[in-house]
Image (cartoon, rainbow, N blue to C red):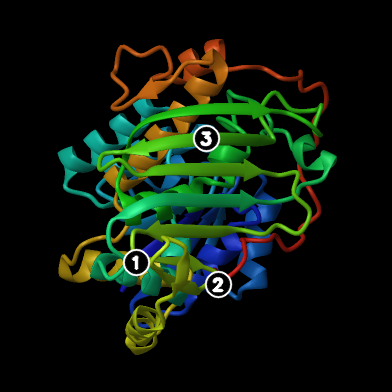
């Protein structure tokens, strides 16, 4: 029986607790940590975590032989807490984004390697049937070479969203909607496409004058094989319509699911290639559904890796790749320059201090609240 601790009792911790509770024969939550003891105890009571204790300082657990922790704290704390537990021999599942700088991400990767411990970064959107099917369809190459990818990570957040004490600052949140909302869709795009070689980006803050960070960004990408891409990240879009669209030379597929294939008439104009559409649809229909969805699927993947040595679907390196692309977006949008990859350790955007000094500060955060009412949060559409 694996001993589990939840670090951070905020809104997202509920998804982690529920996920571990889906595997009662394999793991047990023994502690919930939060700087506010009442929040930790509330989670214990809410989910009937018998035998679990509320802890205000995670350092108390470092010598308690905890097998795995879920880190659900603000982004600026991820690296320090992760490294402490990895060095203590504990496996770590850390919420997105894995860190607020590439320097911190590299320290996390080094800690995992040095101690033989597992590091997984939350990307729960991969663990859904539509995403798994889309990935398999792309891997089949039925679409031909990918020529364009479109990522729309469109959300809406009210002005008071950034009143929470750690949000809306480069120091504590690490960025705005690009880092903390589009991260999931950027992860999925990289999983399916691989990394770009260069990008050009713009960003703005159009509706949240209580935040230093962006509330919308747009990025143009170029990939190794010549494909182009576009990422739009936003918290100003009513309706929160998110999608990933992959245009292949022979066909187009997307999440939410749609397949369209075209062939050329004698004058070069398109007509439907129903045979290819049916072939792609047949492949998608025959692929199995995901058994455990979202955070539960990722926790299952983590437990399997601990128990059997099977691979992590989202490891620390994968999390770093996503962070590197986002840091590249911030660099380009702040400097007006085209950014090429990889970003080197000498880059001024490699460290958190460098980002704080060189990223555009749109507004000053003048006021903050300690906690919001404990309400449900949205985790995105089922793509």
Q: Which mark is residue 135?
A: 1
Q: Is residue 305 left or right of residue 82?
A: left
What residue sits right under mark 3 in the picture? Answer: 219
Q: Tell me, yes or no, whether the two marked residues, 3 and 1, touch with CB atoms within 8 Å.
A: no
Residue 95 appearing in the image = no
Q: Which mark is residue 24?
A: none
Tell me where residue 328 appears, x and y as whole percent: 43, 27
Q: Quadrant of the N terminus?
A: bottom left
Q: Is residue 15 left or right of residue 163?
A: left
Q: Quadrant of the C terminus?
A: bottom right
What residue is shown at x 77% (from left), y 42% (from top)? Answer: 161
- As rendered, which of 130 and 118 lies closer to the eye? 130
Element class at badge 3: strand
Q: Tell me, yes or no, whether the two marked residues, 2 and 3, touch with CB atoms within 8 Å.
A: no
- As rendered, which of 267 and 294 lies closer to the eye? 267
Residue 263 appearing in the image = yes
Instruction: Compute the Cα span from label 3 to label 1.
Output: 22 Å
Of pointers 3 and 1, the one earlier in the residue sequence: 1
Of pointers 1 and 2, the one earlier in the residue sequence: 2
Q: Is residue 98 left or right of residue 202?
A: left
Tell me where residue 184 appears, x and y as whole percent: 49, 52
Instruction: Compute the Cα span from label 1 to label 2.
Output: 36 Å
What residue is shown at x 25% (from left), y 52% (from top)? Answer: 118
Element class at badge 1: helix
């Amino acid at each position: 029986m694996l001993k589990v601790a939840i670090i951070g009792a905020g809104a997202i911790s509920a998804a982690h607790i529920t996920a571990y509770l889906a595997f009662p024969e394999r793991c047990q939550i023994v502690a919930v940590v939060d700087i506010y003891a009442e929040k930790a105890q509330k989670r214990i009571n809410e989910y009937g975590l018998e035998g679990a204790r509320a802890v205000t300082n995670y350092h108390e657990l470092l010598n308690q032989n905890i097998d795995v922790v879920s880190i659900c704290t603000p982004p600026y704390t991820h690296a320090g807490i992760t490294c402490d537990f990895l060095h203590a021999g504990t496996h770590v599942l850390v919420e997105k984004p894995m860190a607020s700088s590439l320097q911190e991400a590299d320290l996390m990767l080094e800690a995992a390697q040095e101690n033989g411990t597992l590091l997984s970064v939350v990307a729960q959107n991969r663990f859904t049937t539509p995403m798994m099917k889309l990935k398999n369809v792309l891997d089949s190459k039925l679409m031909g070479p990918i020529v364009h990818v479109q990522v729309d990570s469109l959300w809406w957040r009210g002005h008071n969203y950034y009143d929470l004490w750690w949000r809306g600052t480069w120091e504590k949140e690490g960025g705005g909607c690009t880092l903390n909302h589009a991260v999931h869709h950027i992860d999925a795009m990289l999983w399916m496409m691989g990394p770009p070689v260069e990008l050009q980006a713009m960003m703005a803050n159009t509706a949240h004058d209580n935040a230093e960070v962006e509330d919308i960004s747009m990025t143009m990408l170029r990939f190794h094989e010549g494909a182009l891409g576009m990422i739009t990240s936003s918290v100003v879009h009513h309706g929160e319509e998110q999608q990933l669209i992959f245009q292949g030379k022979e066909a187009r597929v997307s999440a939410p699911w749609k397949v369209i294939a075209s062939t050329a008439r004698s004058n070069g104009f398109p007509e439907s290639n129903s045979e290819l559409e049916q072939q792609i649809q047949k492949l998608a229909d025959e692929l199995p559904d995901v058994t455990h969805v979202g955070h539960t699927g990722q926790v299952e993947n983590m437990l399997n890796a601990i128990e059997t040595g099977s691979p992590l679907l989202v490891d620390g390196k994968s999390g770093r790749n996503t962070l590197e692309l986002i840091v590249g977006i911030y660099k380009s949008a702040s400097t007006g320059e085209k950014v090429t990859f990889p970003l080197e350790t000498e880059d001024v955007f490699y460290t958190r201090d460098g980002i704080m000094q060189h990223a555009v500060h749109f507004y000053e955060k003048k006021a903050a609240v300690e906690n919001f009412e404990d309400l449900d949060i949205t985790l995105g559409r089922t793509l």
